[in-house]
Image (cartoon, rainbow, N blue to C red):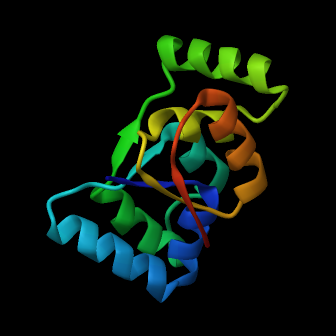
Amino acid sequence: MSVVLDAGALLAIERGDRRIAAVLKVELAAGRSPRTHGGVIGQVWRGGTGRQARLAKALQGAEIVAIDDALGRRVGILLGHSGGADVIDAGIVLIADDGDEVFTGDRADLLALAAAAGRQIDLVDV
């Protein structure tokens, strides 16, 4: 099991949310890196100074998946099957493996995308 972070989780890190900080600490202590993709970072990154110092530090220990041609095509196929339109959310679902915990502020959309993708992921609200 891995931890996957969507934009809501990254914003929670910025706010200093203790629960998400504790989750990240446990993951890193166990030798696991939380995962996200570059599109999610693009949703929240505004320069890394000031309040984003927490986020910048957290991202140093994260696995950042690139939205390359292969993932982009898979995202498009998933959106076609699901009737969805959010590339970023679809990418989160596709970088998650069965059994992963996805920390999200967008439960409804991710639930529908996970069902369309046949993914068994645990959604954790942030």
Camera-side residue of 93 and 111: 111
Residue 109, horizontal then vertical, whole percent: 76, 47
- In the displayed structure, 40 sits above or below 29; it is above
Q: Is residue 88 visible?
A: no
Q: Residue at x 77, y 54 (%)?
A: 108
Residue 9 figure quarter: bottom right
Residue 111, horizontal then vertical, whole percent: 69, 48
Q: Residue at x 65, y 34 (%)?
A: 90
Q: Determine whether, in the image, residue 100 is placed left or right of residue 44.
A: left
Residue 92 figure quarter: top right
Q: Determine whether, in the image, residue 39 is placed left or right of residue 80.
A: left
Camera-side residue of 52 and 89: 89
- In the displayed structure, 52 sits above or below 98; it is below
Residue 107 figure quarter: bottom right
Q: Determine whether, in the image, residue 80 is placed left or right of residue 41.
A: right
Image quarter of the C terminus: bottom right
Q: Residue at x 68, y 64 (%)?
A: 105
Q: Determine whether, in the image, residue 72 is placed left or right of residue 13.
A: right
- In the displayed structure, 74 sits above or below 19; it is above
Q: Residue at x 44, y 29 (%)?
A: 66
Q: Residue furthest bottom?
A: 18
Camera-side residue of 16 and 79: 79
